[in-house]
Amino acid sequence: MPLDQVDVDRIDEQQQIMEKEMSFLDHLEELRWHIMRSLGAIAVVGILIFVFHNYFFDAVIFGPTQSDFVSYRMFCEASHAMGLGDSMCFEFEDYQLQAIKFAETFITTIKVSFIMGFVFAFPYVFWEVWAFIRPGLYPKERKAARGIVFVCSMLFILGVLFGYFIIAPFATNFLMNFTLPGVDNSPTLQSYTGFLVMFTLPTGLVFELPIVVYFLSKVGLVTPQAMRKYRKHSIIGILLLAAVITPPDVITQFLIGIPLFILYELSIFVSARANKQYEAELDD
């Protein structure tokens, strides 16, 4: 090979390496701005919640600690309507949370404000994530994922609302009524808000199950046949989960387990449609 040809090949190779590096740096810069805008949205909402923290904590955060909470009244009315008497009625007195650590109220308020900022800003945050991922997808993949921001946002919000209005009241009532002889059950502000976040935020992520199943089915890792095969196992898992987060009675366990089972069945339907698209692409 002529010497000048070798030099040209080396120059071309160096140019390709520089282009790849520039492309990687450009993507990194783009990702940084997506993250900055997402954090900015969370910060703005979190600051607004912090400014109006008195109203927000009294109306939202401390809602399940009050005997007139909307969920308690709805379940009691539903219990009487179904002829179950007071079996689904909650009986406990309003209790006062306490702060025993220095600056606990201030630090807890900041934490809760920004966690709730993430919850309220989730549609925008997910839109930023999708805006970064979308250009790297093929046209078919973009078409298949049309409306994903709306669907994911709605599922997340429904999950958080389910955790707040269903799981949190049952869990709060059970934990407050579970006492030991000689022990005064007076929860702290930090422990209560920590459990409330645990009852709501993970539930919002669990409700994303159909979306996760959809993409796993699109690449052939999950099939509707496998999900139907392990349906019995999923029922046992759902009942165990409901038993852990609810009082030990059948009514409340089924009340929480049924929506989770519906979510699993919906995921099977989603998997079937995505799996058909995957098989069609393989045939092509």
Image (tube, helix red, strand yellow):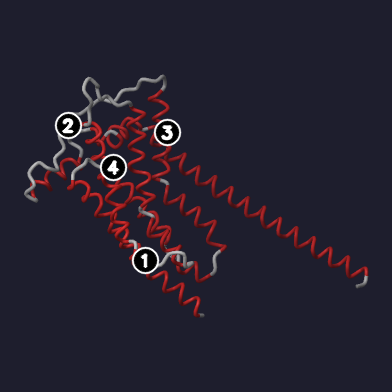
Please name the amino acid that badge 1 sits on: Val
> For the N terminus, which image quadrant?
bottom right
Which one is earlier in the sequence, the residue at label 2 or at label 3? 2
**Residue tagged by mark 3?**
111
Which mark sits nearer the N-terminus, 1 or 3?
3
* Residue type of the residue flagged with mark 3: Lys
Query: Which numbered disc covers residue 270?
Result: 1
| Most foreground residue, 48 or 207 | 207
Q: Residue furthest bottom?
A: 284
Q: Label 4: which residue?
A: 245
Residue corresponding to mark 2 = 92
- In this rendering, position of residue 141 left or right of residue 105: right
Which of discs 4 and 3 lies nearer the camera? The answer is 4
Element class at badge 3: helix
Amino acid of disc 4: Ile
Q: Identify the residue at horizontal 38%, vertical 36% (top origin).
A: 49
> Quick one: SS at disc 1?
helix
Residue drawn 37% across the image and 66% down it: 270
Q: Nearer the viewer, mark 2 or mark 3?
A: 2
